[in-house]
Amino acid sequence: MTESECQELLALDPQQESEFKKKVKEAKNKKRRPDSQVNQLTPGVIYVGHLPLGLFEPQLQSYFEQFGKVEKLRLSRSRKTGGSKGYAFIQYECGDVAEIVAETMNNYLIGERLIQCHVVPKEKVHEKMFVGSRRRFKKPSQPAVTRYNRVRSADQVTKMTDRLLHKEQKLRKRLAARGIEYDFPGFAAQVPPKKKTGLDSSTCSDDATPVCTPSLLERRKSTAAGDDGDDEVVIKMPPVEDLDSSSTSEDDA
């Protein structure tokens, strides 16, 4: 190494030392410039709607990563059933990439559906939009659809009906207390009216074996005893042969 090269690296002269420090600063700034450019990138969020059935987080991640790095992805799902609601939010590392994706994928045909895609403005991006997006989705153990459509016993149906009617009655009272005159059929119109139980209701029931209780049998005996004391009107009809003979005698006359 020559003396001139040594002087360039480490100068004893104050003027040359200041120039050396400037060059070192410039070199450090050149090394940090790529990192600063990455930090200056503003992320962009796009809305993807009208998604077909069968597209979930893994499929959306693999498809939209062909445009650029996907930082976050949130598919809207139902909390009760776990099914997709048909729209998602995707955040890209660069906002320019998000704009390109929105222009390219808007009205794009996938699975017989036209995808609706547009950029979400920065002021409309909620701070909790991507909360839990990195967590793997677990389907509910007992979705609401199967829980609601399960086969219930007769006691469960009656309890559920009484509960709904009770809630509806409370609602009508609250409306009346506020002075609102609003009449609606509600659940009461869907419930069949109860049949009036009479003395012979058990014999006319739809059951295979009619219900015969001791109290019902005593009522029948009392009614039968009361019917014996009533005066009955008996009409005696002439036999059929007498009617035929009388008609022939009239013809001979």
Image (cartoon, rainbow, N blue to C red):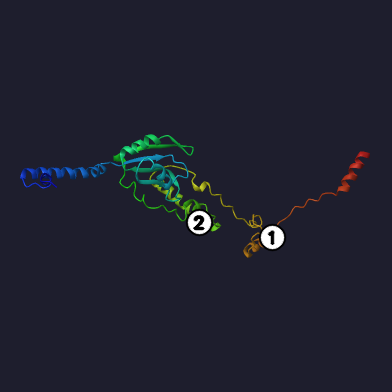
Residue 77 in view of the camera = no
> Based on the displayed image, in which of its 4 quarters is residue 45 positioned?
top left
Residue drawn where x is 91% and y is 42% of the image: 248
Residue 119 or 173: which is nearer the viewer?
119
Where residue 58 appears, x then y in whole percent? 42, 47
Q: Alpha carbon of mark 1 to alpha carbon of mark 2: how far?
A: 39 Å
* Image coordinates for residue 8, horizontal then vertical, percent: 12, 44
Residue 206 spot, x, y in % from top left: 64, 54
Q: Using residue 128 as the reference point, say whether residue 232 is left or right of it.
A: right
The residue carrying mark 2 is 159
**Of residues 73 and 81, which is closer to you in this image?**
73
User: Along the line of sight, which residue is nearer the eye, 2 or 56?
Assistant: 2
**Which one is nearer the viewer's eye here, 29 or 168?**
29
Q: Which residue is mark 1?
A: 224
- Estimate how packed mark 2 is, as few (under 14), some (14 to 19) or many (20 or more) residues with alpha carbons within 10 Å: few
Q: Is residue 18 above or below residue 148?
A: above
Q: Residues within 10 Å of mark 1 (few under 14, many from 20)?
A: few
| Callout count | 2
At x 10%, y 42%, the residue is 19
Element marked by disc 2: helix
Pick out the residue farthest to the bottom.
214
Q: Quadrant of residue 24?
A: top left
**Identity of the residue drawn at 5% across and 45% down:** 14
Q: Is residue 13 left or right of residue 141?
A: left
